Amino acid sequence: MSTALETIVLGGGCFWCTEAVYVKVKGITDVESGYSNGHVERPSYEQVCTGTTGHNEVVKLTYDPAQINLRQILEIFFVVHDPTTLNRQGADSGTQYRSGIYYTTPEQKQVADDMIREMSQDKLFGKPVVTEVLPLSSYWPAEEYHQDFFEKNPYQGYCMAVAAPKVAKFRKTFAQLVKA
């Protein structure tokens, strides 16, 4: 019996960093960098960077729920980015870097809402969680040069300074979920 694959879209700052982590996660069958929940069709990276399109830099994850559940995916998400900074991740600022979970099923919304409520009750971050949880309203793949960016450019300055530490944190915190 095979399980149907599921899709969820996550915005955790620069998509290079988020993609670099999720390509290493067991049960994730595909990761694509893109732009979501904006109002311009087929936006370019340059347009999204202006902050005027409403889009968020995101990764679209396809996963096998028989190998990894959404709660595990979101636990990784909340460890590898700061869900308490509005429209900012580190030095990257603008609405395109907002923390967001864009669900494709009502069940995904429930899991995300429950986790955020639990983290807020436990004061896990010491500050309010500002992650938006919205239905996926639009999605456009990013340009080809953004796909697998960290893998293709591991010695690029941003990758070494920002993405590599996130990948290392994932590997250390979630060793049991790292692909062989």
Image: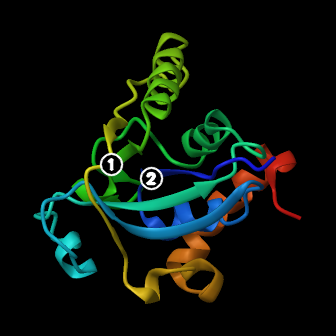
Q: Measured from the top left, where is residue 109 in percent x and y? A: 43, 30
- The residue lying at 22 percent from left, 81 percent from top is 46
- The residue lying at 55 percent from left, 12 percent from top is 122
Tag 2 secondary structure: strand
- The residue lying at 69 percent from left, 43 percent from top is 65
Vertical relation: 106 (above or below) 18: above
Q: Which mark is residue 9?
A: 2
From the viewer's perspective, tell me whether residue 6 is left or right of residue 127: right
- Is residue 142 shown to the viewer in this render? yes
For marks 1 and 2, the one nearer the N-term is 2
The quarter of the displayed image where residue 21 is located: bottom right
Residue type at the position of mark 1: Leu
- Is residue 162 shown to the viewer in this render? no
- The residue lying at 73 percent from left, 63 percent from top is 24
Residue under numbered circle 1: 136
Residue type at the position of mark 2: Val
From the viewer's perspective, tell me whether residue 17 is left or right of residue 42: right
The quarter of the displayed image where residue 20 is located: bottom right
Q: Measured from the top left, where is residue 74 in percent x and y? A: 58, 39
Tag 1 secondary structure: loop
From the viewer's perspective, tell me whether residue 6 is left or right of residue 93: right
Residue at the far front: name it.
1
Q: Mark 1–mark 2 contact, CB under 8 Å?
A: yes
Q: Measured from the top left, where is residue 73 in percent x and y? A: 63, 43
Q: Measured from the top left, where is residue 30 in percent x and y? A: 61, 66
- Between residue 19 and residue 95, name the one nearer to us: 19
Number of other residues with Cα within 10 Å of mark 1, as a class: few under 14, some 14 to 19, many 20 or more? some
Q: CA distance from mark 1 to mark 2?
A: 7 Å
